[in-house]
Image: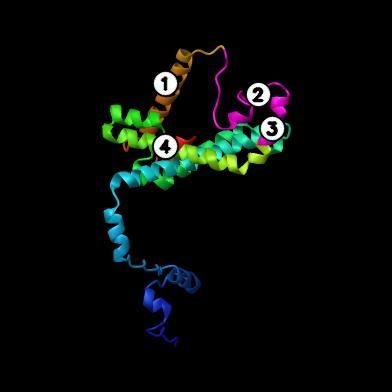
């Protein structure tokens, strides 16, 4: 006569008599999860966080976020500009993806602190239509300009030798350095001679409005097509 399983047998413990022992053991191995306990926060750090003003944290987050998306973008532009004859060093598509992923990483990293504006036009849009305090607008814009300036400064330090050689070549050709595709264009875009200020304003107004609508749609909790986890990448693209 077959003997019954002892009380400490896995089948007795889990009460799963219709499962094979191997599957039961596999389930048992993945049932328990060990979580590392968080280290206690020192009182000194708590006092520092309490004493640091909220607006300063928001400005630091805005500056850091702008740096995170501007630097990879202009670095891709610089690589593409300095190596136009070699397709392996980049393309306009790569430049676009560099800015897109930079924006996504900036939102993931800093948006929880400042709201993730990272653009003066977006800050003004939020203040105009979304109730963002107007008194914070100058602080946000200053932080955004500062973050972009630091990204450009770091880029110039990294590519100074290559840009100096390229600038000398364009000067020798009589083109100077300030033109689209020139050494100065790695930091900003220059309008053509036949483009008026009104035309440029309309372009910027339309593009910023388009981006604002996309951002508000991505952040709308009633939007069933975008999850919170995918919002940074949707906005970046």
Q: Position of residue 87 (x, y in %)?
A: 71, 34
Disc with the residue nearer the chain's start (2 vs 1): 2
Report the mark closest to the observer, 2 or 1: 2
Cα gap from disc 1 to disc 3, whole angstroms? 34 Å
Read off the residue under disc 1: 205
Q: Position of residue 19 (x, y in %)?
A: 45, 69
State the image quarter where residue 84 is shown: top right
Callout 3 environment at 10 Å: few (<14), some (14 to 19), or many (20+)? some
Residue 171 in magenta stretch: yes
Q: Is residue 197 left or right of residue 173?
A: left
Locate the N terminus by quadrant: bottom left
Tally the marks: 4
State the image quarter where residue 93 is shown: top right
Cα gap from disc 3 to disc 4, whole angstroms? 29 Å
Read off the residue under disc 3: 166
Kind of element beneath mark 4: helix
Cα gap from disc 4 to disc 1, whole angstroms? 19 Å
State the image quarter where residue 207 is shown: top left
Disc with the residue nearer the chain's start (3 vs 4): 4
| Mark 4 touches mark 1? (CB < 8 Å) | no
Report the mark closest to the observer, 3 or 4: 3
Residue 176 is labelled as 2
Residue 144 is labelled as 4
- Above or below residue 119? Residue 157 is below
What's the magenta region?
164-193
């Amino acid at each position: 006569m077959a003997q019954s399983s002892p009380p400490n047998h896995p089948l007795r413990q889990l009460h799963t008599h219709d499962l094979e022992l191997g599957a039961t053991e596999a389930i048992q191995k993945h049932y328990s999860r060990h979580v590392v306990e968080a280290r206690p926060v020192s009182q000194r750090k708590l006092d520092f966080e309490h004493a640091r003003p909220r607006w300063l944290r928001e400005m630091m987050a805005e500056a850091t976020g702008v740096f995170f998306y501007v630097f990879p973008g202009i670095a891709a532009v610089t690589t593409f500009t300095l190596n136009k004859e070699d397709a392996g060093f980049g393309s306009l598509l790569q430049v676009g993806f560099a800015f897109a992923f930079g924006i996504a990483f900036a939102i993931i990293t800093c948006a929880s602190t400042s709201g993730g504006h990272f653009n003066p036009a977006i800050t003004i849009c939020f203040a105009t239509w979304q109730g963002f305090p107007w008194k914070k607008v100058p602080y946000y814009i200053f932080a955004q300009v500062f973050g972009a300036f630091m990204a450009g400064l770091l880029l110039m330090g990294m590519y100074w030798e290559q840009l100096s050689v390229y600038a000398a070549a364009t000067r020798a050709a009589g083109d100077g350095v300030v033109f689209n595709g020139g050494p100065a264009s790695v930091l900003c875009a220059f309008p053509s001679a036949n483009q008026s200020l009104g035309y440029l304003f309309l372009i910027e107004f339309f593009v910023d409005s388009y981006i604002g609508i996309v951002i508000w749609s991505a952040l709308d909790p009633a939007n069933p097509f975008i999850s919170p986890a995918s919002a940074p990448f949707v906005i970046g693209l």
